[in-house]
Amino acid sequence: MIQERTGIAVDADSLFDIQVKRLHEYKRQHLNVLHIITLYNQLKQDSKMKGIPRTFIFGGKAAPATLWPS
């Protein structure tokens, strides 16, 4: 379904890490992105690294803006 709708092929047997919610500056969202960057950097340093195939999917909409009185 992902490839059909987006044109991006993903491994259906990979571990899916999905986070769908309003996008805020939450610690959990930051930590998840830092984890992705760490895995990416490790893979770039050692292309023979063993690991679990993973697919990361983020979905959401912007959090409502806080209205400050003028």
Image (cartoon, rainbow, N blue to C red):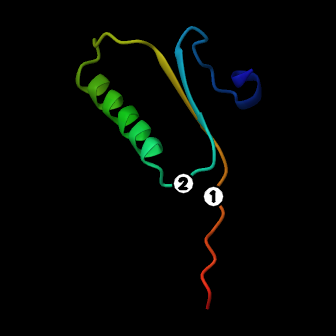
Say if mark 2 contacts mark 1, CB within 8 Å: yes
Horizontally, residue 61 falls left or right of residue 32, namely right
Mark 2 or 1 closer to N-term? 2
Question: Tag 2's secondary structure?
Answer: loop
Q: Residue sitting at 64 percent across and 77 percent down?
A: 67
> Dot 2 surroundings within 10 Å: few (below 14), some, or many (20 or more)?
some
Residue 46 rendering spot, x and y as whole percentages: 24, 19
Q: Which amino acid does the dot numbered 2 rest on?
A: His
Instruction: Reply above or below: 29 against 54.
Output: below
Is 45 in front, or is 22?
22
Quadrant (top left/top right/bottom left/bottom right) for the N terminus:
top right
Q: Position of residue 26 (x, y in %)?
A: 47, 50
Secondary element under disc 1, as helix, strand or loop, is loop
Residue that numbered label 1 is attached to: 63
Q: In terms of image quadrants, where is residue 51? A: top left
Q: Where, by quadrant of the figure, is residue 37 drawn?
A: top left
